[in-house]
Amino acid sequence: MARKCSLTGKRRNVGMNVSHSHVRTKTVQLPNLQTKRVWFEDEARFVRIRLSCRALRTITKKGLSRFLRDEGMTIRDVA
């Protein structure tokens, strides 16, 4: 399974470490992914989703149904 948020699509970010002598080496920044059980109001059940903490904050604020509606997604796209 790829390290990717199933709701927002956040993935790893590749950057460069630059030393004092300007030697550049590649580095990877991974998203903060969590596996959570989220309540899905439309079907009155829990859904297990692997999502970023940023998406989790948005779901806490809006709710899963409204978040999916705003993004034009369905629960089938996520799970």
Image (spheres, helix red, strand yellow):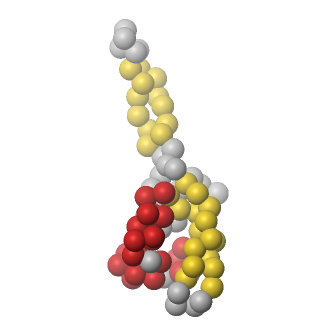
Left or right of 34 in this view: 65: left
Residue situated furthest bottom in the rendering: 43
Q: Which residue is located at x 55 percent, y 54 percent?
A: 33
Q: Quadrant of the N terminus?
A: bottom right
Quadrant that contains the C terminus: bottom right
**Which residue is depicted at the point 48% across and 31% down?**
27
Relative horizontal placement of residue 56, taking residue 36 as reference (left or right): left
Please identify the quarter of the rendering in which residue 76 is found: bottom right
Residue 53 locus on image (x, y percent)? 48, 57
Q: Quadrant of residue 35?
A: bottom right
* Residue 22 appears in the rendering: yes
Quarter of the image for residue 8 reads: bottom left
Q: Nearer the viewer, residue 36 or 68?
A: 36
Name the one closer to the observer, 64 or 6: 64
Q: Residue at x 39, y 75 (%)?
A: 62
Residue 51 vertical position relative to residue 37 in the rendered view, above or below: above
Q: Is residue 68 visible?
A: no
Furthest toward the front, the residue is: 61
Q: Residue furthest top?
A: 21
Task: Residue 31: give x, y in percent of width and height.
Answer: 49, 49
What residue is at 42 percent from the left and 24 percent from the top? 17
- How many badges with numbers are in the image? 0
Q: Establish if 79 lies above or below 5.
A: below
